[in-house]
Amino acid sequence: MKSHTARLGAAIAVAVAVGLLATAPVAAHVVEHADPYTLEIGWQNEPTYVGAPNGVQVIVHDASDKPVNDLKTDDLKVVVSTGGKQSDELTFDPGFDLEEGFGTPGEYNAAIVPTAPGDYTFHVTGTIKSTKVDISVTSSEETFDTVKGTSDIEFPTKLPTLPEIVTRLDRIDARVATPSGVPTQATIDAADAHAAAARAAADRALAVGVVLGGIGVVLGAAALFVAIRGTRRSPA
């Protein structure tokens, strides 16, 4: 009898626990209010890793705790920011299909791929059936997941991070733009300067040559004139 009572008590405890889990807010989401609506905001997928496709998730319920399933694409928007940078406005798409019976009613997702580890802020704005929404939430241990790098879960080879890949591509682009053996603009400018100096020196040498040549002609003509006069004055 006692064993039966214990089993019954355990079953009731499990049922209560399941009921609590079913009615509890989505794990790792922030619960915010835009009266009379409740919004649960967080990542679509957790844990959240750099480079993994994800999305900002908003689950909307009305004052009667019924899911709001008829929001239009432009009713709500979100700007995501981290590390002093922010995204453009992202729009939400339904994360459910009532006809097909999949997904969570009232769920809306804005697709994004986080590319840097750290805490992210979601600034959700817009309207829900004419009720204004302006909510900002930031990831933390108490709210939703902080974006993590993937090095701790990579096996057997550690892959380069996205910033490392970008840096390497920039270096490759620089080498392609200025391949080995091809002169740079600075080299071309220096060569032009040397060529100009050489032309100027050649012009000066030519000018000096012309002057000296002219002097030689004059001196030769003078010598010839003196010789001719000396011949005419000689006695017969």
Image (cartoon, rainbow, N blue to C red):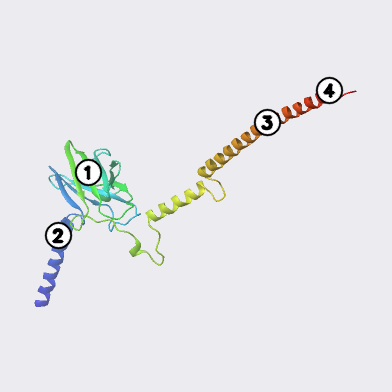
Per the rendering, the mark at residue 77 is none
- Disc 4 to disc 3, how far (Cα)? 35 Å
How many other residues sit within 10 Å of disc 2, few (<14), some (14-19) or many (≥20)? few
Per the rendering, the mark at residue 124 is 1
Vertical placement of residue 195 versus 156, above or below: above
Q: Which SS class for mark 1? A: strand
Marks 4 and 3: which is nearer the front?
4
How many other residues sit within 10 Å of disc 3, few (<14), some (14-19) or many (≥20)? few
Q: Are marks 1 and 3 in contact (CB under 8 Å)?
A: no
- Kind of residue sitting beneath label 3: Val
Per the rendering, the mark at residue 233 is 4
Query: What residue did someone put label 3 on?
Result: 210
Q: Position of residue 56 (x, y in %)?
A: 27, 49
- Disc 1 to disc 3, how far (Cα)? 85 Å
Vertical placement of residue 209 versus 168, above or below: above
> Which is more toward the observer, 3 or 214?
214
Query: What residue did someone put label 2 on?
Result: 20
Q: Residue at x 26, y 38 (%)?
A: 74
Residue 79 in sight from this viewpoint: yes
